[in-house]
Image: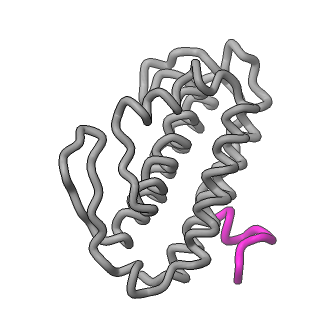
Amino acid sequence: MDVADIKHLFDYTQWANARTIDAAEQLSDEHLHHNFHISHNSIFETLLHMAGAEWIWLERWNGRSPAKTEAWSLWTVDACPDLAALKTRWADVIARRTQYLLELDEEKFNSEMFFQLLSGDPSSMSLAHQMQHVVNHATLHRGQVVGMIRQLGIEPPSTDMIFYLRSDISPK
């Protein structure tokens, strides 16, 4: 995997996340906040978790490892009470990540990057593996959101990568 590959995966992730958010916007508040007793309880809380996780990793890539208390205070229903607020905050994370990726070179991408876990414990992984994890994490939780939407009896969006690859926006 190289920088071009990870940029492509983040483009796909952004496309699929946007489709998922668009579907969530069509739901009633009752459906959006219904507790399915999986993942992070509701569709909204799962989307909030996804955005918060992307923010945490981006912070780490920029040399700052947020503490659990900071992460949880910024990415809660109280701090981000609705989809409009979530979309605004997530758009900022995406814009910052896009800029980070524009400046990313192969050497940094393949280097070991140290960070602190939310517990405060030290850890490290290559930046490439961290970024692969972020993409995979989003895929996992999008699948859960799609499943929750399906449980509501509503047709969920198609977010599989094959649909992105066949779309007009995917680089050929």
Q: Quadrant of the C terminus?
A: bottom right
Query: Relative to residue 119, is residue 132 drawn left or right?
Result: right
Quadrant position of the N terminus in the picture: bottom left
Residue located 63% across and 66% down the image: 98
Q: Is residue 48 above or below residue 93?
A: above
Report the predominant secondary structure element of the magenta stretch.
Answer: loop
Inspect the magenta stretch and tell me whether residue 165 lies in it: yes
The part of the image, by quadrant, that contains residue 100 is: bottom right
Q: Residue furthest top?
A: 30
Q: Please give the name of the residue rendered at 71% of the width and 73% of the height, measured from the top-left corner.
A: 170
Classify residue 93 as left or right of residue 122: right
Across and down, in percent, residue 91 comes to: 69, 49
Q: Quadrant of residue 96?
A: bottom right
In the picture provided, is 80 more to the left or to the right than 69? right
Q: Is residue 96 magenta?
A: no
Q: Position of residue 137 (x, y in %)?
A: 43, 50
- Which residue range is magenta in the image? 162-172
Nearer to us in this view, 111 or 172: 111
Counting from the top left corner in percent of width and height, residue 93 is at 61, 52
